[in-house]
Image: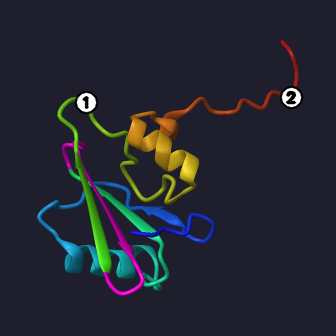
């Protein structure tokens, strides 16, 4: 397993995904809903409805790899709909796997005057 972190993009599919889907089903979702080119080493993240199961699909030189993580306690922070973030950087991926909810971070306030 060799991931070129300088070139790989990390895409997240908002909402939940049926975790019974394996490589072929997840590859179809990745191609149809996220990115046309799924053979360039990008990572595609999927989460279950319970937010306790996470799958990562990526192409590794001559075949797909599927990474699976199941949490015994707690839940993954996950965007609910397509209006939320769809592409992550490596730092955000690390935070996601650590359970840090950067999707709901404090919003920047833009005031025009002090009252």
C-alpha gap between disc 2 and disc 1? 40 Å
- Check if residue 31 falls in the magenta segment: no
Q: Nearer the viewer, residue 21 or 2?
A: 2
Which portion, as a residue range, is magenta?
49-63
- Check if residue 60 falls in the magenta segment: yes
Q: Residue furthest front?
A: 1
Q: Nearer the viewer, residue 60 or 57?
A: 60
Residue 84 x, y percent position in the rendering: 49, 52
Residue 11 x, y percent position in the rendering: 46, 64
Q: Nearer the viewer, residue 36 or 93?
A: 93
- Earlier in the chain: of badge 2 and badge 1, it is 1
Which residue matches tag 2?
112
Residue 1 x, y percent position in the rendering: 39, 69
- Residue 58 versus residue 13 in the image, above or below: below
Which residue matches tag 1?
74
Quarter-wise, where is residue 13 in the image?
Answer: bottom left
């Amino acid at each position: 397993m060799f991931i070129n972190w300088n070139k790989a993009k990390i895409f997240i599919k908002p909402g939940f995904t049926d975790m019974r889907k394996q490589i072929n089903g997840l590859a179809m979702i990745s191609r149809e809903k996220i990115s046309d080119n799924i053979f360039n080493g990008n990572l595609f993240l999927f989460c279950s409805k319970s937010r306790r199961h996470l799958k990562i699909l990526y192409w590794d030189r001559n075949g797909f790899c599927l990474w699976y993580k199941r949490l015994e306690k707690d839940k993954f922070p996950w965007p609910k709909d397509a209006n939320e973030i769809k592409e992550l950087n490596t730092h955000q991926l690390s935070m996601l796997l650590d359970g840090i909810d950067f999707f709901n971070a404090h919003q920047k306030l833009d005031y025009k005057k002090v009252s």
